[in-house]
């Protein structure tokens, strides 16, 4: 029954909470395991082609909603400002940040790369475990 619900969820608008409810109803012990396993997952996301007229707090708002409803940890890495020259560099097979290093888009990309590649302190690593 649970497997069928998960398969159905892929092809419909079944919410994650519906799957948790089904597991809780049919196998309560597995619900705790499932919540803990999913809770250990971390998701990182980026808003691409971000335009000026968009809400500057959109990423933080999305993080808040996702963390509240999806039983996992979501982290917003940042936005990448829209720049029409990106498509030109793709066609030319050149690196945008090398060709246009002083743009907002390049600064956004550098910030995201820094977050993904920086070394973590001992405290940060310990906090991840808990």
Image (spheres, rainbow, N blue to C red):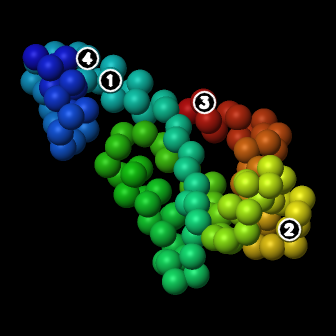
Q: Quadrant of residue 30?
A: top left
* Residue count near mark 1 (Cα–Cα under 10 Å), binned few <14, some 14–19, many ≥20: some
The label nearer to you, 2 versus 3, is 2
Q: Secondary structure at mark 3?
A: helix
Mark 1 element type: helix
**In front of the other: label 1 or label 2?**
2
Q: Is residue 87 visible?
A: yes
Which numbered disc, 1 or 3, marks the residue closer to the eye? 1
* Mark in front: 4 vs 3: 4
Q: Residue at x 35, y 52 (%)?
A: 68
The crowd level at tag 2 (other Cα within 10 Å; few <14, some 14-19, many 20+) is: some
Q: Which residue is mark 3?
A: 129
Q: Position of residue 39 (x, y in %)?
A: 43, 33
Give the residue at mark 1.
34
Q: Are marks 4 and 1 in contact (CB under 8 Å)?
A: yes
Coordinates of residue 126 in the picture (x, y in percent): 68, 33
Who is closer to the viewer here, 10 or 72?
A: 10
The residue labelled by disc 2 is: 100
């Amino acid at each position: 029954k649970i497997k069928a619900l998960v398969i159905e969820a892929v092809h419909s608008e079944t919410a994650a909470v519906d799957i948790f409810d089904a597991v809780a109803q049919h196998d309560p012990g597995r619900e705790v395991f499932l919540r803990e396993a999913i809770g250990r997952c971390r998701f990182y996301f980026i808003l691409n082609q971000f335009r000026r007229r968009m809400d500057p707090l959109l990423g933080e708002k999305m993080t808040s909603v996702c963390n509240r409803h999806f039983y996992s940890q979501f982290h917003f890495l940042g936005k990448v400002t829209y720049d029409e020259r990106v498509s030109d560099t793709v066609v030319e097979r050149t690196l945008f940040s090398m060709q246009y290093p002083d743009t907002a888009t390049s600064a956004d990309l550098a910030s995201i790369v820094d977050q993904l590649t920086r070394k973590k302190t001992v405290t940060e690593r310990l906090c991840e475990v808990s």
